Amino acid sequence: MTEDQVDVFLAAVIAMAEPVESHFFWRPQLRDPTDEFVLEAAVNGQADAIVTFNVRDFGAAPQRFGVEVWKPLEALRRLTP
């Protein structure tokens, strides 16, 4: 992708984002404490998936909450008709 295409893509993703209030804190669940807020936002926001290059650090914890973890290429494949 060109830099302009990346800018357009990111702007579209940001336009779809919705703020999520944390009503429940699920810590600790992950081996990397810096990833905890991502899991909490996904669970509290009722996300279907977390998209990250850092799949290994999430382990099985997201699945206990019904959240899948995808690498970016997998997300693109699932979202592309």
Image (spheres, grey):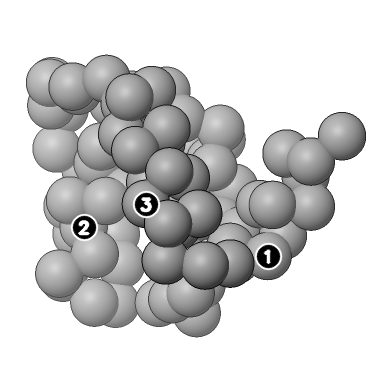
Residue type at numbered disc 3: Asp
According to the picture, the residue beneath numbered tag 3 turns out to be 7
Which label belongs to residue 73? 1
Query: Does 66 sit left or right of 40 as displayed?
Result: right
Q: Nearer the viewer, mark 3 or mark 1?
A: 3
User: Alpha carbon of mark 1 to alpha carbon of mark 2: how far?
Assistant: 23 Å
Q: Residue at x 43, y 76 (%)?
A: 54
Q: Nearer the viewer, mark 2 or mark 3?
A: 3
Front-most of residues 5 and 29: 5
Residue type at numbered disc 2: Glu
Disc 1 crowd rating (10 Å Cα; few below 14, some 14-19, many 20+) is few
Query: Does 5 sit left or right of 32 as displayed?
Result: right
Q: Nearer the viewer, mark 1 or mark 2?
A: 1
Q: Residue at x 54, y 42 (%)?
A: 49
Residue 81 seen anywhere in this rendered image of the structure: yes
Front-most of residues 74 and 5: 5
Q: Where does the image place residue 34, in percent across and percent down from the top left?
A: 15, 69
According to the picture, the residue beneath numbered tag 2 turns out to be 36
Query: Does 22 sit left or right of 11 as displayed?
Result: left
Q: Where does the image place residue 37, in percent across and percent down from the top left?
A: 17, 51
Q: Residue at x 18, y 22 (%)?
A: 19
* As drawn, 22 above or below 40: above
User: Alpha carbon of mark 2 to alpha carbon of mark 3: how far?
Assistant: 27 Å
Q: Secondary structure at mark 2?
A: helix
C-beta proximity under 8 Å, tags 3 and 1:
no
Residue 42 seen anywhere in this rendered image of the structure: no
Q: Residue at x 79, y 41 (%)?
A: 80
Marked residue nearer the N-terminal end (2 or 3): 3
Q: Where does the image place residue 36, in percent across and percent down from the top left?
A: 21, 57
Residue type at numbered disc 1: Leu
Q: Secondary structure at mark 3?
A: helix
Q: Where does the image place residue 58, in percent across and percent down from the top left?
A: 43, 67
